[in-house]
Every structure is written in structure tokens, then in C-alpha cells.
Amino acid sequence: MIGTDNKALENILTRTSVRSYSSGNVTDKELETVIRAAMSAPSAMNKQPWHFFVIRGAKLREAIAEMLEYGKQSLRNASAAIIIAGDKSRFFEDPEAVDYWVEDCSAAAENLLLAAHAIGLGAVWCGVYPIPSRIDQMRKATGIGDGYVPMCIIPLGHTEGDHEPKDKWDPAKVTYLD
């Protein structure tokens, strides 16, 4: 991995998916910080078609049970999780552009993951959309209504153990078109 003294690049290059958490709770300030970062993401025509559902306590345990049902161990010790969902009232009406919400919410999710890493939290992206059974499971576990499409759930917690970043650079996946 290349070394850099740029804090933003260093944060991007050292972010890892964290699936094990200590018993410490994520604070309201930490949650607001990562959600503010997520809302700073770009979106097509500034539609901002995202909605963030913060889950803790009993709802988090229900979501954990649903996620474990399809093999996601990532929520087991998380003290909070954020579901990023598309708000259908903010989708484009044009059928050719309606799915831009996925790109917009994905940008928000990446910002959230980077912000979590920057403030010392562990997090991992767990996909929900586009699998209908996962969408239904998440709605059932959390009570999210039909006006929203759960895209992903990101468990958060204080990292337990060492998590080394992977060097994913592969020059074979780059083509320069001059």
C-alpha cells in the first residue's frame, strides 16, 4: 500500500470491514457524526433520496436475528446499526432514472463507513437490496414501511481485535483510454 501524509487518503486506504465489536456503546454524538457525513454524499439532481434508521436495543436484537437467519454474523455484538433506505417519495419519476436512488444511497453508505473509521468505530456494509426476502425480513424486524426500500444495514461498534486493511490495488483492472 502506498504511504501518504494526507489524512483523507489515509482514512480511505486503511478502512476495513469490522465484524467484531467490544461491549462499549456507540454514543449519540458518534451516530450523528456518521449520519452527517453520510448526508454529505452527492446525489443525482440533489434529490437526497435517503433515509437513515438508527436501531438499538430490542429492535437491534430483532434485526440481528433476521440477519443471522441469512448468514450475516456482523451484527452479533454491535451496539447500534444504521439502515440506509431509499425514500420512495424522493425517487425520480422517470422510469429510466428511478434507480439513481441506489447510487445515491451507496455514496451515502460509503461516506458513513469512512466517517465511522475516521472517528475510531468499526463498521461493515451488509447488503439488503435487491433481494426481496431480505427487504421483507428487514421490514418485518424493524417496522420500516413500504415508503422506504432498505438498501443496506451497517452495524457499528467499538472495534475488537486487530483489523488490517487489504491492499486491493490491481493494475490489471485499469485501462487508460488516451
Image (cartoon, rainbow, N blue to C red):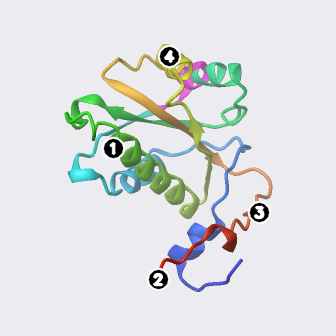
Q: Is residue 51 above or below residue 66?
A: below
Which residue in the structure is indicated by mark 4?
136
Q: What is the x, y in percent for residue 155? A: 59, 39
Q: Amino acid at mark 1?
A: Tyr
Magenta stretch, main secondary structure class: helix
Q: Earlier in the sequence, mark 4 or mark 3?
A: 4
Q: Which residues are magenta?
A: 55-62
Tag 3 residue = 164
Depth check, front residue: 20 or 58:
20
Q: Earlier in the sequence, mark 1 or mark 2?
A: 1
Q: Earlier in the sequence, mark 4 or mark 2?
A: 4
Closer to the camera, 14 or 105? 105
Mark in the foreground, 1 or 2: 2
Residue 71 at x, y = what percent? 73, 27
Residue at far top of view: 140
* Label 1, label 2: how far apart the Cα atoms are: 29 Å
| Residue that sits furthest to the front in the current view | 178
Residue under numbered circle 2: 178
| Camera-side mark, 4 or 3 | 4
Provide the secondary structure element on which disc 1 rests.
helix
Picture coordinates of residue 13 (x, y %)?
A: 62, 70
Reading the image, the residue beneath label 1 is: 100
